[in-house]
Image (cartoon, grey):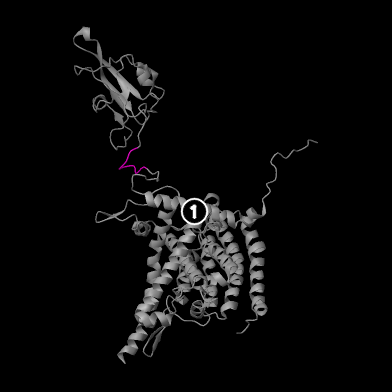
């Protein structure tokens, strides 16, 4: 009886509380990787001055210091701003970002005796659709943030962002259809589990291997969705100062900042789950792993595998950011509508036809 | 009507460049090369990171660097300056103010009772050094002059400080 309650507590109380906290704790790490990575790419040192009890820590505490600084800064309200939306916008940006991570599994369903604990907050049968539905809400935070402060630069940033996010959402949605066709499910845990299969007997059936074009399109669209360089038009510093979060100070700015990094983490998690085998450890299915080390340790190992892949994708995003320059706006739109969209459609056609040619349809 | 001649030829990209991905990967290879090299050699003797960590490390300035002024002394400890006011007259930003006074012994001539440099006005051109017939003023390598108090350097302050090489 007691163990029933314990399992329920873990499933419905610990996970929903722990995952967002872990996600938020990922932000400083992401910022640290970004800043130190950028510095080393540019032959600089990066933040390294901060000490804790006289201990140099390679600047890993710098994000905490920044957050503390933002916390005690003046909270500025621009004249003639739309107060309600001005206060609402940062929350609107951060909340969907945190929410989308809830359906991403970080280990296989943990089977202990008669209990089956899904290693995610919510094992929705509409997984990917839920992510797309919630992720598109994030654009409201940006649009409100651009419109509410009654500032020209902000408005331009907000407009750019809305146009860009809507454009790339199309390509993103279409690029993921290939994956759905291959794995025949929208439940993320099913997709990840099927990626443990072997192709030709030795190749893990990861999304990136069966859908290379889909991976490319999805990754590029994810970069655009998270407003990362080379698609950071909404906050192009050289043109529109800072874009939609220009008039925000103090912790409201911090919330936008956090939202960007949580969005990155979500995008990385999604790329990992859909294309890089999620929690799969290559050539080690859950059953084999559980037989060797027991179910609990197997779950921990799988979570480790997921986290490692996730941070690899994060690093990939940082790496791309400090390599490429920003797109011009017409180039951005041209890429989205004239290149990515047709390619995504082509990918869907090919993915639909190939099983018929190979005769493996509905095997 | 004038004929317009287009002098910049339209750039033609070949297929490889138009795909864009190959070039992106090349660029990423370059940045990764820098990243790995800097990471591996960081804090070793072969460090490739170019940052000078300022309060801990200092840039090596040229010997001709024009930093904080210093009034020189004779070997017997008396001031070299004879308060001729040539530096004051030569100063383009009028930041030097001198009030001469005579030694009791007439054979010794004059000395500056007051020698002030308004360092907020000074542009560090070094014309005072050029103008000085007695080689009494020089500019040291000291560049860290941030302070809240001594905006106008007085004579005794300018006389102090280490002898520069």
Which element type, helix, strand or loop, lies under badge 1? loop
The picture places residue B76, in percent across and down from the top left corner, at: 19, 16
- The residue stretch that appears in magenta: B52-58
Quarter occupied by the C terminus of chain B = top left
Residue drawn at the location 37% of the way across and 45% of the way down: B47
Residue drawn at the location 34% of the way across and 52% of the way down: A48
Label 1: how many Cα within 10 Å (few below 14, some 14–19, many 20+): many
Whether residue A79 is visible to the viewer of this picture, yes or no, is no
From the image, tell me which residue sits under label 1.
Answer: A322
Based on the picture, tell me whether residue A42 belongs to the magenta stretch.
Answer: no
Based on the picture, tell me whether residue B53 belongs to the magenta stretch.
Answer: yes
Residue drawn at the location 41% of the way across and 75% of the way down: A302
In the rendered view, would you say A24 is above or below B95?
below
Out of B19 and B88, give the one closest to the viewer: B19
Q: How would you classify the magenta stretch by its main secondary structure?
A: loop
In the rendered view, would you say B6 is above or below A363?
above
């Amino acid at each position: 009886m007691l163990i029933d309650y314990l399992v329920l507590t873990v499933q419905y109380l610990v996970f929903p509380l722990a995952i967002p906290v872990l996600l938020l704790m990922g932000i400083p790490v992401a910022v640290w990787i970004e800043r130190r990575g950028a510095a080393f790419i540019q032959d600089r040192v990066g933040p390294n001055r901060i000490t804790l009890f006289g201990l140099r820590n390679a600047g890993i505490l710098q994000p905490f210091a920044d957050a503390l600084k933002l916390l005690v800064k003046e909270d500025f309200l621009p004249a003639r701003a739309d107060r309600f939306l001005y206060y609402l916008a940062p929350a609107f940006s951060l909340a969907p970002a945190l929410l989308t991570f809830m359906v991403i599994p970080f280990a296989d369903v943990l089977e202990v005796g008669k209990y089956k604990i899904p290693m995610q907050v919510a094992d929705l049968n509409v997984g990917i659709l839920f992510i797309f539905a919630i992720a598109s809400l994030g654009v409201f935070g940006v649009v409100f943030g651009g419109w509410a402060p009654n500032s020209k630069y902000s408005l331009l940033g907000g407009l750019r962002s809305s146009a860009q996010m809507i454009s790339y959402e199309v390509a993103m949605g279409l690029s993921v259809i290939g994956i759905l066709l291959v794995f025949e499910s929208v439940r993320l845990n099913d997709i990840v589990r099927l990626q443990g299969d072997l192709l030709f007997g030795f190749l893990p059936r990861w999304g990136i291997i069966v859908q290379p074009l889909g991976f490319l399109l999805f990754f590029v669209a994810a970069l655009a969705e998270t407003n990362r360089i080379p698609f950071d038009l909404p906050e192009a510093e050289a043109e529109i100062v800072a874009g939609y979060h220009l008039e925000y100070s103090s912790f409201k700015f911090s919330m936008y900042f956090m939202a960007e990094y949580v969005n990155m983490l979500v995008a990385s998690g999604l790329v990992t789950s859909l294309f890089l085998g999620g929690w799969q450890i290559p050539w080690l299915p859950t059953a084999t792993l559980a037989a060797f080390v027991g179910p609990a340790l197997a779950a921990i190992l799988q979570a480790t595998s997921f986290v490692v892949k996730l941070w690899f994708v994060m690093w990939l995003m940082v790496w791309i950011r400090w390599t490429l320059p920003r797109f011009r706006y017409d180039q951005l739109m041209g890429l989205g509508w004239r290149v990515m969209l047709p390619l995504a459609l082509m990918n869907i056609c090919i993915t639909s036809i190939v099983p018929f040619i190979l005769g493996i349809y509905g095997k | 009507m004038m004929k317009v001649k287009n002098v910049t030829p339209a750039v033609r990209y070949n297929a490889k460049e138009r795909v864009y991905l190959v070039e992106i990967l090349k660029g990423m290879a370059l940045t990764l090369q820098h990243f790995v090299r800097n990471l591996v050699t960081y804090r070793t003797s072969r460090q490739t990171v170019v940052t000078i960590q300022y309060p801990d490390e200092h840039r090596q300035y040229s010997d001709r660097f024009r930093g904080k002024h210093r009034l020189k002394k004779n070997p017997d400890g008396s001031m070299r300056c004879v308060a001729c006011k040539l530096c004051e007259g030569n100063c383009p930003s009028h930041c030097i103010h001198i009030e001469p006074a005579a030694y009791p012994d007439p054979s010794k001539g004059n000395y500056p009772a007051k020698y002030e440099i308004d360092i907020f006005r000074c542009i560090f051109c070094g014309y005072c050094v050029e103008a000085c017939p007695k080689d009494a003023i020089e500019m040291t390598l000291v560049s860290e002059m941030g302070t809240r108090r001594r905006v106008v350097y007085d004579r005794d302050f300018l006389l102090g400080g280490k002898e520069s090489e």
